[in-house]
Image (spheres, grey):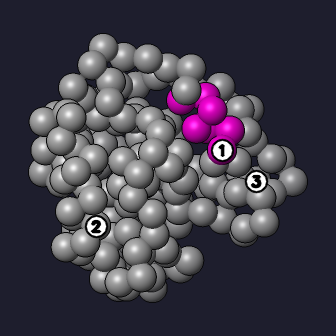
Amino acid sequence: MFIYVVFFGDLEMKLVLAVAGNIKKTFGLEARVSSVPFPSKEGYDPVRGQYRAGDVIRYLSSLNFPGLVKMVAVVSFDLYEEGMNFVFGEAELGGRNAVVSTYRLRHPDERVFFERVFKEVNHEIGHCFGIGHCPDPKCVMSFSNSLADVDRKEKDFCSSCRDSLKAALKPYL
């Protein structure tokens, strides 16, 4: 049973491997990294200069790997969803697929940048395991509308969300 990490765009392998390590530590499932081709026009809006997150997730639905439990795409390009200027990521609540963009998470300090990416990856995979947004602003499942929100929260789940995650992970561990 694996959580697959696929990546598109200009990303350093160092980051992708760190994301895989974070997933193993956070969710207790092995993470496998796979590079797959991404159709460059899939979900791209030339007027906005952004990709629609839902279209990326639909593309992920066409991919299948042995032992796949969940899949998260980490992308370097900017994402949006209808009615929003941008999104850091998106996931299928209780589903299989998620996407996280590094585009707005960048920081000159690599440690801060990686931590931001880990938070958003954990958040979106949490949604895949059926966990909704949390009112605790420190919980990784709190909604992030800005970088300040991302920086405020921790990369871990609050006790209530952790209990929900443990229950959701039980069939896979």
User: Could you tell me the amino acid type at mark 3?
Assistant: Gly
Disc ID at residue 12: none
| Cβ–Cβ under 8 Å for marks 1 and 3 | no
Q: Is residue 56 magenta?
A: yes
Give the labeled residue for mark 3. Answer: 49
- Residue 121 in view (yes/no): no
Q: Is residue 2 visible?
A: yes
Task: Looking at the picture, tell me which residue is in the foreground, 168 or 13.
Answer: 168
Residue of label 2: 161
Mark 1 or mark 2: name the one nearer the start of the chain: 1
Q: Name the dominant secondary structure of the magenta segment.
A: helix
| Disc 2 secondary structure class | helix
What secondary structure is marked by label 3? Answer: loop
Q: Quadrant of the C terminus?
A: top left
Q: Nearer the viewer, residue 16 or 56?
A: 56
- Circle 1 Cα neighbour tier, 10 Å, few/some/many (<14 / 14–19 / ≥20): many
For image coordinates 36% across by 35% down, the residue present is 70
Q: CA distance from mark 2 to mark 3?
A: 35 Å
